[in-house]
Image (cartoon, grey):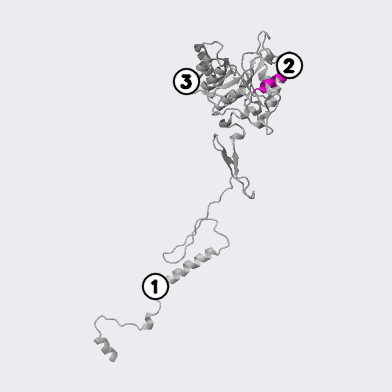
């Protein structure tokens, strides 16, 4: 009855407070949350303790309200790369070639290979300096020779060019070093792409060679060969003749070759009779092949055996298509140059031969400027030579 009386006296709506011990118990909501956490931890532990990782993407669902645990998809299988070398486009400087390595090859070896073009061609900044590996000492001066590693003067002293296969014209201007003022004017006025040929009878050839190379020109050495009606028509000192012994001709050839250095090959000066004689021409061409030099035929003789002998002896060969200044007239020279352009557009390249006359130098200089605007590339003679060693 006392308890009933107390309930009646209690204000309306006031609930009875539970004992303190009851308030300290765990609520059903807390129990449910705890079960959810334990379930998630249990599934995660099971995944972590598996012996092997998942091989295929799949989902693992946990049977607790509103909680889903998904295993991350494993990476797709990677196919081992095929070894290959990535070579960047041709540049004037060193090139870096990245090489991919096969699996199972062991520790990385030579992952990066450096290819430096200067190991073959010569840096234009030092083009006037001879490569000591390409020089053989002689009584008359330095002789060109293949290096011990196989490099040839033809390769090392060649002027770089674009390598494009458009219409190309090579022009060789000979007779340098005969006239001091004419030589100076030719080097200064002619575009660097024009090849210069030095006469062995000239003066200060070494100095003029250096000036030409510093200006960017490729150079060749002229060699006097016997023409018909010799000696009435005389190419000059130490001419190679058909009546001389092979030893005598090689001695005269080596004299001409020793007059300077840093040239890619030789070009005949006259020589219609000599170049048509296999007995005389054979040892001459073999010597060029041994020394790694090219032969430039001025194209003046249709009977020349040079193309066949050059191929036989591994000598890079270039044959002239036209003498551009046989007539010393500006209009006539321009006509010959235009003919060269037409030939180049038809067959890919053409070769013109001229001499260091003032009129020739001035005419060629102006024509080259206009020809470039028409899409003609002026190239050194080495760029259009047929090289048996390169197929």
Q: Nearer the viewer, residue 321 or 38?
A: 321
Q: Which of marks 2 and 3 is nearer the N terminus?
A: 2
Q: Residue at (73%, 16%) from the top-left corner?
A: 279
| Residue 381 seen | no
Look at the image and tell me in which quarter the C terminus lies: top right
Please tell me whether residue 252 belongs to the stretch shown in magenta: yes
Q: Which of marks 1 and 3 is nearer the N terminus?
A: 1
Q: Nearer the viewer, mark 1 or mark 3?
A: 3
> How far apart, in angstroms, are the residues tagged by discs 1 and 3?
94 Å
Q: Give the range drawn in magenta.
A: 251-259
Residue topped by disc 1? 29
Residue topped by disc 3? 370
Neighbourhood count class around disc 3 (C-alpha, 10 Å): few under 14, some 14–19, many 20 upward: few
Q: How many callouts does the rendering have?
A: 3
Q: Earlier in the sequence, mark 1 or mark 2?
A: 1
Residue topped by disc 2? 279
Neighbourhood count class around disc 2 (C-alpha, 10 Å): few under 14, some 14–19, many 20 upward: some
> How far apart, in angstroms, are the residues tagged by discs 1 and 2?
114 Å
Question: SS for tag 1?
Answer: helix
| Residue 224 seen | yes
């Amino acid at each position: 009855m006392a308890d009933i009386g107390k309930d009646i006296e209690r204000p309306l709506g006031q609930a009875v407070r539970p004992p303190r011990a009851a308030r300290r118990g765990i609520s059903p909501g807390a129990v449910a949350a705890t079960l959810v956490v334990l379930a998630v931890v249990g599934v995660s532990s099971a995944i972590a303790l598996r012996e092997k990782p998942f091989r295929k993407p799949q989902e693992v669902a946990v049977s607790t309200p509103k909680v889903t645990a998904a295993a991350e998809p494993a990476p797709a299988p990677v196919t081992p790369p095929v070894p290959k070398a990535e070579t960047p486009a041709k540049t004037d400087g060193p090139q870096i070639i990245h090489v991919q390595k096969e699996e199972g090859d062991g520790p990385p070896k030579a992952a990066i290979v450096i290819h430096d073009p200067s190991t073959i061609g010569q840096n234009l900044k030092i083009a006037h300096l001879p490569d000591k590996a390409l020089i053989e000492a002689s009584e008359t001066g330095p002789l060109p020779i293949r290096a011990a590693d196989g490099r040839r003067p033809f390769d090392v002293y060649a002027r770089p060019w674009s390598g494009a296969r458009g219409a190309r014209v090579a022009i060789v201007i000979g007779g340098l070093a005969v006239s001091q003022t004419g030589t100076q004017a030719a080097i200064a006025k002619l575009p660097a792409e024009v090849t210069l040929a030095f006469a062995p009878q000239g003066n200060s050839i070494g100095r003029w060679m250096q000036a030409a190379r510093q200006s960017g020109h490729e150079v060749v050495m002229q060699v006097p060969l016997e023409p018909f009606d010799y000696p009435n028509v005389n190419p000059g000192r130490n001419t190679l003749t058909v009546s001389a012994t092979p030893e005598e001709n090689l001695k005269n050839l080596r004299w001409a070759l020793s007059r300077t250095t840093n040239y890619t090959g030789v070009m005949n000066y006259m020589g219609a009779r000599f170049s048509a004689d296999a007995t005389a021409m054979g040892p001459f061409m073999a010597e060029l092949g041994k020394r790694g030099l090219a032969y430039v035929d001025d194209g003046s003789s249709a009977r020349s055996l040079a193309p066949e002998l050059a191929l036989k002896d591994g000598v890079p060969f270039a044959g002239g298509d036209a003498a551009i200044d046989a007539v010393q007239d500006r209009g006539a020279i321009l006509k010959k140059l235009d003919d060269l352009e037409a030939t180049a557009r038809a067959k890919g390249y053409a070769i013109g031969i001229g001499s260091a006359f003032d009129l020739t130098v001035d005419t060629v200089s102006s024509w080259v400027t206009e020809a470039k605007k028409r899409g003609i590339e002026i190239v050194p003679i080495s760029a259009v030579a047929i090289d048996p060693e390169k197929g």
